[in-house]
């Protein structure tokens, strides 16, 4: 059983952190960041060509982090692989002893650094969950028996600030039926959003980790409000950043305090910290949050 699964099933407040593979093969910085949070998180999500930008693969990075003593969460998108490649990569993850997988449909290639690349989208996130569940049952998608089967704790994503929220809940139900046991949310900055989301999803048999993206500047906050669907940074948070002498440190403090509030009100089962290129700040966020 994976450490993340064990923590969530035992009612612990779970913590995962996101790490992006480098654009190249120099892993020194990533490994140092990983060592700094070893023993403080239940899982480390490794992005899969995040924002359709070419990097080292999630699978290779997961193997490196696992060798460093962390528990990786393999991200798998349907954008770049057909069903044969997805199954093959999931079997490879199982071979490496990777026990967590997060299914994503994936951003379109036009938003990335290779806009001319042809997207695949043979399977969406629900399809990836379905095939992972099938592999875990010892067969491939067409019914062939496997010689040895992988074990995964399956997850997916959800956006709590979505109108109408019922659409997201319907998607969650489909993902749960396909095998999802936990959800990591889009970044959240206000308690009211999580209060409503918690109330409307209390009937679902799953665990929810609230997404946390520490702010680095006023410009970053306003950019997300204007350009990233499902993210809302309240004006009072923006004003805190604006009035701070050290805006990065204030963003860390805001993130840590927000995690404390989520935990105190029992608005989620854990948090997923996405530092976006500043993974070295994760320990400081955990310090403020008391984790």
Image (tube, rainbow, N blue to C red):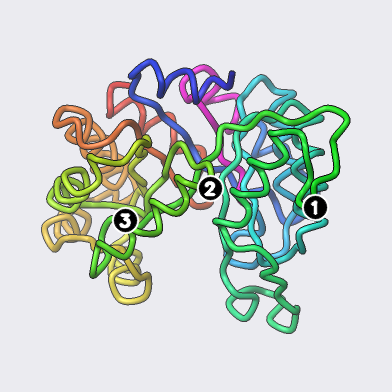
Label 3 or label 2, whichever lies nearer to me, is 2
Disc 2 target residue: 178
Where residue 117 sits in the image (x, y, percent)? Answer: 75, 78
Q: Say if 6 sits above or below 170 in the image.
A: above
Where residue 15 sits in the image (x, y, percent)? Answer: 41, 29
- Secondary structure of the residue carrying tag 2 is helix
Q: Earlier in the sequence, mark 1 or mark 3?
A: 1
Disc 1 target residue: 142
On the rendered structure, is 192 left or right of 172?
left
Look at 23% across and 69% down and name the residue there: 164
What residue span does the magenta drawing correspond to? Answer: 33-47
Q: Say if 98 sits above or below 139 in the image.
A: above
Contact? badges 1 and 3 (CB < 8 Å): no
Look at 60% across and 40% down and name the residue there: 101
Where residue 227 sits in the image (x, y, percent)? Answer: 36, 75
Look at 45% across and 52% down and name the residue there: 157
The foreground one among 266 and 20 is 266
- Secondary structure of the residue carrying tag 3 is helix
The foreground one among 204 and 79 is 204
How far apart in space, not on screen, are marks 1 and 2 (Cα)?
17 Å
* Residue 169 disc label: 3
């Amino acid at each position: 059983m994976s450490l993340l699964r064990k923590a969530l099933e035992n009612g612990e407040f779970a913590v995962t952190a996101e790490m992006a593979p480098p654009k190249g093969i120099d892993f020194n910085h990533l490994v140092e960041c990983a060592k700094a949070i070893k023993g403080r998180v239940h899982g480390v999500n490794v992005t899969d060509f995040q924002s359709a930008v070419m990097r080292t693969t999630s699978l290779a990075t997961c193997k490196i982090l696992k060798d460093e003593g962390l528990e990786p969460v393999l991200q798998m998108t349907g954008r770049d692989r057909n069903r044969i490649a997805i199954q093959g990569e999931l079997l490879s993850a199982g071979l490496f002893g990777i026990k967590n997988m997060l299914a994503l449909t994936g951003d379109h290639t036009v938003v990335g650094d290779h806009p001319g690349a042809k997207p695949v989208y043979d399977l969406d996130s629900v399809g990836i969950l379905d095939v992972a569940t099938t592999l875990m049952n010892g067969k491939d998608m067409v019914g062939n028996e496997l010689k040895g089967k992988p074990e995964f704790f399956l997850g997916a994503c959800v956006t709590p600030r979505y109108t109408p929220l019922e659409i997201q809940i319907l998607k969650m139900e489909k993902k749960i039926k396909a095998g999802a046991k936990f959800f990591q949310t889009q970044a959240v900055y206000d308690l009211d959003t999580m209060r409503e989301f918690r109330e409307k999803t209390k009937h679902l048999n799953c665990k929810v980790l609230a997404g946390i993206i520490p702010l680095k500047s006023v410009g970053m906050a306003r950019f997300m409000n204007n350009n990233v669907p499902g993210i809302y940074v309240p004006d009072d948070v923006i004003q805190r950043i604006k009035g701070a002498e050290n805006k990065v440190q204030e963003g860390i403090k805001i993130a840590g305090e927000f995690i404390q509030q989520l935990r105190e009100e029992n608005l989620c089962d854990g948090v997923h910290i996405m530092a976006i290129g500043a993974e070295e700040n994760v320990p400081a966020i955990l310090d403020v949050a008391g984790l």
